[in-house]
Each structure stands twice: as structure tokens, then as C-alpha cells.
Image (cartoon, coloured by chain):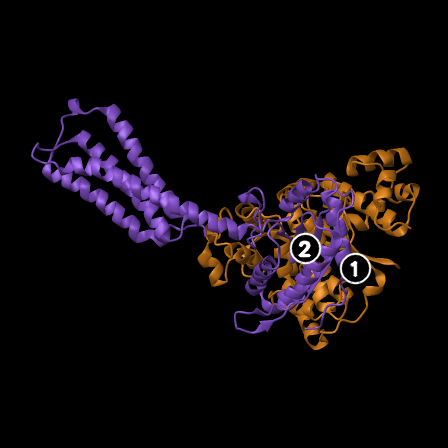
Chain colours: A orange, B purple
Amino acid sequence: MKGYLADQPFIPAHHQPAELIDLIQDQGIDLNRLLRHTGLFHEQILSGEACFSPRTWLQLIHNARRLQPDPELSFRYGQRLFPGHYGSVSALLANAGNLGEALQVFRDFSRLILPLLGVRLTVTDKHVCLHWLPSTGYRSEHRFVVEAAMTALASVTRWLSETRLPWAFQFSYPQPGHPEHYEVYLGGPLHFDAHIDAMILPRQYLERPWPQASSTIRLPALRQCRQQLEGGSGDSLRLCLYRHLQKNLADAPSLPRVADLLRCSPATLKRRLKDEGCHFQQLLDEVRLHQAIHWFQFEGYSTEQVAKGLNFNDNTNFRRSFKRWAGVTPAMCLKQLVVGD
Amino acid sequence: MANMTALHRCSIATIMAIGLGILILNLTVGSLKPAAEIAWLDIGGEGGAALLSLMWTFFIFNSRPTGWVTRLLSSGLAFIFFSYWQDVLDEFIQLPASVNWDHWLESGTMPVGMILLTLGIYHWHREQQAINRQLLKRERIFREHRSFDALTPLSGAGYLREQLSRELQHPGRPVALIMLDLHCFDHSRRLLGGADSDRLLRELGEVLVLNLRQKDLLCRYAGDRFAVVLPATEYGAAENLRRELDQAANSFAFKTRRGETHAPTVHTGLAVSKDDDAQTLIDRANQQLLTTRPDQPRVA
């Protein structure tokens, strides 16, 4: 499993972080105060050689929020993010022929397009669901990152499709004190306390052709993006593990078995996860909760079917575990769902 | 705007030079007192006063642009500082009895400083009145500098809710709320770039303010959406104002940095209170806005 790590510096400072730096500098705030504790300096950034790691980028966001405590900052940052000037991946996104191709960029090239979040893409007969997943266990700025990512995707898909797409939004956190930014920047039905951070759209928008796309640019860009990953994964280590667990949920994966598969000792895997700010059990619980919600929401499963799918022997046990993961019972959760069958 | 001090480099240098000059003058003419004769309590009191007056001078410099009100205030405080400074130096340095300029410096500068400061404060007060008149339609009843948003000199949604709640306390007096946003601002923003699109919002705010009555209030709700509170206004009058704002904003020809014209189009929504609280009134105005807005962006 070759996913990128939280402390690995590979994000060019003049790519995605630069937009935030510009926004803060527009307010006349000293750049070196913004860069505090990131280990980077102004001159390095201008030289084009400085790189952020996911963690130092989060530190930059933390500094930015402290220096400019305006709740609108994440939304304004998001608006400026895509397609951006990030080399081949920006060309790939800007020339997506339809929504499906655009969303694949986020799913396959998280490392290049938005290294703080990965994407779980679900397409059913009726819906498309883009579920944002944190790439590392460090979630201190999670809300900011989710706000920026959702604004960015809603904005870039509107720009490229030249229509306002009727996204519905789900957020894992409670409604913040400033819903007005969500209303204006995102629009759409907003559902807070929904356990997942996801954007949902009727299926019919997925393959509608977009006007500006050029396959002459897109295909070479796709190849270049694949080359940039150098055979590694477009996902972070945590996301690689997430996807592995998701595929093997029925086999009740455990730490020793996963470690065995990765050809390392359980202690090594534990340590590597700790470096990413997460624990195995916590990640497994998260995968199971997300799977349960996806089954409830898009497949119309009953509680019994979900319990069976997640390898629980009896429903009482499942209900108890679900309550531990989500804070509410499955029945309560079913009521809060955005799309019910 | 983080730091105004840079504008006043010359004035600061002058004050420091005069302070230093007084010190050198004292040292050349007089002689140091023996330690036993030094009254530390006096030094603490006078020295503290000198230090504080110097600090006030810097606060003035740090918070104000150049101009004669600033010059009056800062030179007033500087004279007060010189007076205390000479006072402190007297405690350390024994001047010969033949010298009497030190009395002039000590007692003469104080009234001059006081007069200059008084003049300065009087004109500051006049200046503030002028600013208040300017701000009238952007902030009403009370000032809360924290409620200003970072992008435009308008208050945000929090202040809007506060003011609406205040207005809605009077039953039988309808409050109207207009929501206004730009057509496909997201598209315009990408075409204009960050700096110009931010300026477009600020200047649109100015255009809207010019078309309001004295008692109305303009806020920036979020993003490109503005909110106008019309206190004690019936539906008919509010509808007229809505149409006027619509016309004014639609004939606004914004100029980009390159001098090209970008003419924005706006949509408006209106709600008049009927047993509403602030939130339901905002929601209804937003709803009305969305029904008037076509969903297809204009192809650029």
C-alpha cells in the first residue's frame, strides 16, 4: 500500500496553498505570520521549490483562520481552488467531458487535485453521491476543509457545465452559527448532523455532455497524471486502508490480517497508522458506519440486512454498535437521510 | 491598514530628535546629581506620565492617516511629553541657577500642548460626525466594530439578524426585507479575477447605499448577496424601493482595472413581516429571491 503520508511534503506551495496565501495577503496580513510553524518562508514559496505536506497545509489553514477569523474565508478559498493552475490535473479537470469524468479526477487523483480529502464515489440507478473522506486522521480543520472542498466542487462544476447543478449536501457536523454562507455559496438542501460529508445529485446529470471539453487535451493530461503518481496510489495511506476495509467488510478484517496482507508486522502497521493520526479500530468503525449509511440511503436496506452485511450475528448487537459509532440509533439515522427509498 | 505608523515616519523622528536634543542640552549645561539627592517617587510619577504621553502619541500615529487633525493631536501630546520629559530630567540633572529656559520648557510647553490637544479633539469630534453621517445607512443605532465583514465596509448577517429582531419588536409596524444578489456572480468572478470581483461587490454596495432612505440599513448577507432592512415600511412602498434598487444596480457600469465595462445584472426578493421573527423573514426573502432567479447561467 503506497498511499501518501500526512508528513510527506509533496504539495507545491504555489499550487493549492497559494490561493489561501493570496486571500490572506489581500487583507494586508504579514506573510511570515501566516507561515508560522509550517517550516516555510516567503522566499522559498516565491522560488517555486517549497512544498507543503498535508499536515503543514492544515497548519497554514489554522494560521489563516486565526489571523482572519471570518467564517466566509473557507468559502471564498473554495471558490478560487478549481480548476486552478496545478499542471496536468487542472487540464484534466477543465476538459472533463461530463460530470462523471470530473468526479473521477477527484476519486483517482486526490494526491494531485486535493490532497486533504479523498473521495468515495457511489453511483446508483437514481443518484450520484460524492462522499468526502479526510486523507489523514488529523481533523483539526475538518470543517474548513469540507466547506472549501464543497464550495470548490459546486463552483467548478457550475462553471464547466454552465448550469447550476441541484446538489444536496450532507455534513457530519452540527449546523454552525453562520448558515448564510452555506445558503449563498452552496445553495441546495443542507443537512447537518448527517454523519457523512457528501454531495448528492440525481443520476441524470452524470453523463450530460459539457460544452467546453476537449478530448485532445484531456487524454494526454490523463496520461501525464498517471505518470505523476509513478505507480503509487492517488490516495493517502489512510484512504488506501479505508478502501481495503470497505471491500473486505464481509470478512471481518482485523489488524493482524491486514498487516499480514501488507507484509508488515501488526506493530509496524499500528505505528504507521499512529503517524497518520488514526487507529485501526476507529478506522474500521468509520468504514462500517459509512457503509451502513450508504446501504440505508441508496440501497434501501433494512436494519436486518445492514446488520447481516456488516457481519453482525444479531440485530441488538448491531444497534448497540451503530449507536456507539453514530451517537444515534439506526432508526433515528434512517429518519435523517436525504434520499430515502 | 494593519499599520499606519509608516506614514508618520518624519513626525516620529522629529519628536524623538527633540526629546534627545533636550536630553543633550541638559547634560551639556548641567551636572548629574548625587544619588542621595534623587527622589525616586517623583521620577516614577513624572517618568510614568512622560512614558504614557509618548505611548498615546504612538497610538494616534498608528490609528490615523496623515492630515491636520492628526497633526494637532500628535503635536499636542508631543508637547505634553516634552514638559514631562524636562521634569524627569530635572530630577537627575542639576542645572546652574543662571539657566531659566528649563522652567520655560517645563511649564511653557504644557499649556501649549493642552491647547493643541483640545483643538485636535474638537476637530476629531467634527470629523467623526461627518463619518457618522456617511455610515448612517450602513450601521444603525449602535456601533459594533467587530460586525464589519472583511470584504466590504458593511455589516454581515449577524448584525442583520440583530437589527431585524430589534425592528420586529414593535407589533403593528411592518418591517420589509429585500435580498439582492448578482446574476451568476461565480461566473463573473472567474472572468474578472479576485481583486476586481471583490471591488465589484464593494462598489455595488456604494451604489445601493445611494438609493436608500436615511432609516434603511444595508448589510452584506454572504457572498454576493446583500440585504436591505426597511423599517416601518408597507408592502407598496417596499416594492417601489425594491424596483428602484433593481434599476440602480442594473444600470451600474462597473469598470475593471483595465477600464473595461462589466455591467452586472441583479435579482431581488422582497418579504414584509407578518408575525415573523428575524430568521423566518430572512428565509422568506431568500425564497422569494430564488423564485425570481433563472437557473441557467449566462454564457460568457
**Cα distance between the residues tagged 2 and 1:** 27 Å
Say left or right for A104 vs B60: right
| Label drawn at residue B166 | none
Q: Position of residue A78 (x, y in %)?
A: 64, 57
Q: Position of residue B73 (x, y in %)?
A: 34, 45
Q: Residue at x 82, y 42 (%)?
A: A252
Q: Quadrant of the C terminus of chain B?
A: bottom right
Q: Position of residue A186 (x, y in %)?
A: 72, 55
Say left or right for A32 vs A213: left
Q: Are marks 2 and 1 on the same chain?
A: no
Say left or right for A332 vs B46: right
Image marks 2 and 1: residues in contact by CB distance under 8 Å: no
The image quarter containing residue B152 is: bottom right
Q: Residue at x 62, y 61 (%)?
A: A80
Task: Judge whether residue B41 can be spotted in this image.
Answer: yes
Residue under pointer 1: B291
State the residue lying farthest toward the top. Answer: B36
Q: Residue at x 10, y 38 (%)?
A: B29
For badge 2, the amino acid type reads Ala
Residue under pointer 2: A149
Q: Position of residue B156 (x, y in %)?
A: 62, 49
Q: Nearer the viewer, residue B264 or B235?
A: B235
Chain letter behind tag 1: B
Q: Secondary structure at mark 2?
A: helix
Q: Nearer the viewer, residue A261 or A219?
A: A219
Chain letter behind tag 2: A
Determine whether A121 is above or below B88 in the image: below
For badge 1, the amino acid type reads Thr
Determine whether B30 is above or below B209 in the image: above
